[in-house]
Amino acid sequence: MALDLSTPEAPPRRATTIKTKTQPVSNTPVKPLQQIREEGCNEFFQGLSYITATVGWYADSGTLSIHGPKMANKLAEISEDNENVAKAVDYICKGSPILELVLIFGTFALQIAANHKLVPADKFGDLVQDPEMISAEVKTELMRQKTELLRRQKEQQDAMMEMQAQILQAQTAQNGHVYTENVTVE
């Protein structure tokens, strides 16, 4: 686990573009609306299946996995001719990113709850990691970074001592004298 405690860099400058009246031709084929709707419904049902599995509703998760693709196909097909169904399907398709966001924040909340022993970490499969493992990874990374900083500090101190010795040698060679603080030695 990489823990980045360094100073963040500024984002790169955006390129300035001049808008023209003509749009460039794209080589990417445009998907039919029915296919877009079917894929959106499939994502929605997959998300629900994942959520139900993480809370232990395995039969419901399996049912969604089995019947979700068939339901998505039929919903997309019916939405071609039925405006009300089309509106609902389009809402579900737009809701898929919202479902993903809920899943992401829900997973985050579960992990925090597990970290503070409010819920058992092992109940949620791969959604929640063992808090002791996370702590060990963070501590290890912090120690690695501290070790690296101490190594670099030692290198700088050694380089400074070497430069001081070179300066002393140069002064001795130039004057035939050795200077140490306020005392001159011949």
Image (cartoon, grey):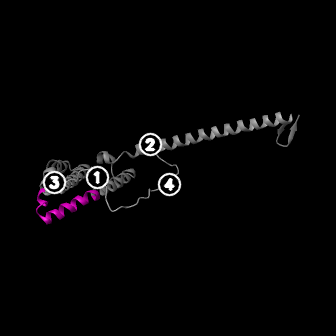
Q: Residues within 10 Å of mark 4 (few under 14, many from 20)?
A: few
Taking the image as shown, residue 153 lies to the left or right of residue 65, namely: right
Quarter of the rendering occupied by the C terminus: top right
Which sits earlier in the primary sequence, circle 4 or circle 1? 4
Which mark is nearer the camera, 4 or 2?
Answer: 4
- Which quadrant of the figure contains the N terminus? top left
Which is more toward the observer, 11 or 67?
A: 11
Question: Which-is-in-front pick, marks 1 and 3?
Answer: 1
Membership of 108 in magenta stretch: no
Q: Which residue is mark 4?
A: 10
Q: Which residue is mark 2?
A: 137
Secondary structure of the residue carrying tag 2 is: helix
* SS label for mark 3: helix
Q: Amino acid at mark 1?
A: Ser
- Left or right: residue 73 versus residue 47 is left
- Marks 2 and 1, how far apart at CA: 45 Å
Residue 88 is a magenta residue: yes
Of label 3 and label 2, which has the lower sequence position? 3
Q: Position of residue 163 (x, y in %)?
A: 72, 38
Residue 164, horizontal then vertical, whole percent = 74, 38
Using the image as rendered, state which of residue 6 and residue 167 is in the foreground: 167
The mark lying in front, picked from 4 and 1, is 1
The circle on residue 26 is: 1
Q: First in sequence, mark 1 or 3: give its number.
A: 1
For discs 3 and 2, the disc positioned in front in the rendered view = 3
Q: Which SS type dominates the magenta stretch?
A: helix
Q: Which residues are magenta?
A: 77-98
